[in-house]
Amino acid sequence: MKGPVDRRQFLKLAGLGGVVLVSGCASSLGPGMAGADSDFYFVQLSDSHWGFEGPAVNPDAQGTLKKAVAAVNGLARQPDFVMFTGDLTHTTDDPKERRRRLAEVSEIVSELKVKDVRFMPGEHDASLDNGKAFKEFFGPTRYTFDHKGVHFIVVDNVSDPTAAIGDEQLQWLQADLDRQPRDARIVVFTHRPLFDLYPQWDWATRDGARAIALLQTHDNVTVFYGHIHQENHFMTGNIAHHSAKGLMFALPVAGSQPKRLPIPWDAGAPYRGLGFREVDAERTPVKYAVTEMPVS
């Protein structure tokens, strides 16, 4: 990176879902593009669960997201963009309340200095109405964009209440991948993991294996996701999958206890289990060195 972000600036990011650094992208650009300014970093936020109430789990439920926004605004060098990887809000059966929570999140994140802010839903935002309310506030639940030599794909694996991507979206994904060179640098955002991390706790995507098979036709694919509220790193073939820690509460390791219950708040170590990460990309071959940073 040009003018790397000071580590002390990163340590201010209490509760962030992840800070992602992408560098050395010029090596994957085509002929005539070698001089492009392709080094950048972005901030990933995940699982803010706005509307959640539970003092035993997070007594700062009304303040954590605001603190995260302030922390990002306080970075010495602002990220190129901010990506929210789902569960912006906590689930509610009341459509009016769902929209109120989405509106409040929109208002809070509007305070970010970075104006390129991108969103995708989690099942708490979208599974009860197939993403209808989410789309009213934040736009499509699936889309692609390109930034400085990297192709980003946002996959919706939450709007379908059965936790499926669906045939139509898989066809859309295949068509998009067919337009990319085999060695294209590709980053995929999902909310749920695409692989079967722990289906008993809904930590899987019903047809995720089909998406992985499509992605494995390309050499340089990395997946960032949320949902499980903790660090996890997993490989499917040549694809690395990295989960982001949550913003509202931490969850236990898969299968470590009978039920998937949030980890209680520890007043002696506030925000334990919430954190952020650095991801640096090596030039050749393309791979990401991931460093998870605890909140202190």
Image (cartoon, rainbow, N blue to C red):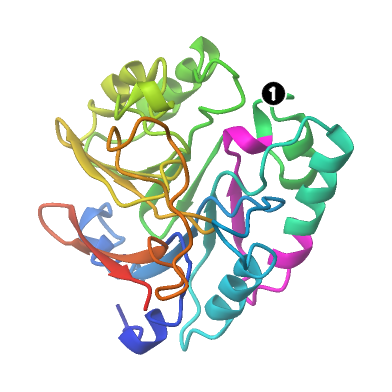
* Tag 1 residue: 130
Work out whether 119 lies above or below 173: below
Does the stretch in magenta take in 121?
Answer: yes
Q: Residues within 10 Å of mark 1 (few under 14, many from 20)?
A: some
Q: Position of residue 141 (x, y in %)?
A: 62, 35
> Can you see residue 215?
yes
Locate residue 204, reporting x and y percent: 38, 25
All told, the count of numbered labels is 1
Stretch in magenta: 106-125
Choose top left, top right, bottom left or bottom right for residue 70: bottom right
Q: Is residue 174 depicted above or below 271 in this figure?
A: above
Dot 1 amino acid type: Asn
270 vs 149, nearest the viewer = 270
Q: Quadrant of the C terminus?
A: bottom left
Q: Would residue 6 be found to the left or right of residue 99 on screen?
A: left
Toward the left, the furthest residue is 285
Answer whether residue 20 is visible to the viewer in this image.
no
Q: Nearer the viewer, residue 138 or 204?
A: 204
Apparent side of residue 127 relative to residue 46 in the rendered image (left or right):
right
Identity of the residue drawn at 68% across and 37% down: 91
Looking at the picture, tell me which residue is in the foreground, 1 or 182: 1
**Residue displayed at 54% across by 86% down:** 74
Q: Is residue 201 left or right of residue 35?
A: right
Q: Quadrant of residue 194?
A: top left
Q: Position of residue 257 (x, y in %)?
A: 32, 36
SS for tag 1? loop
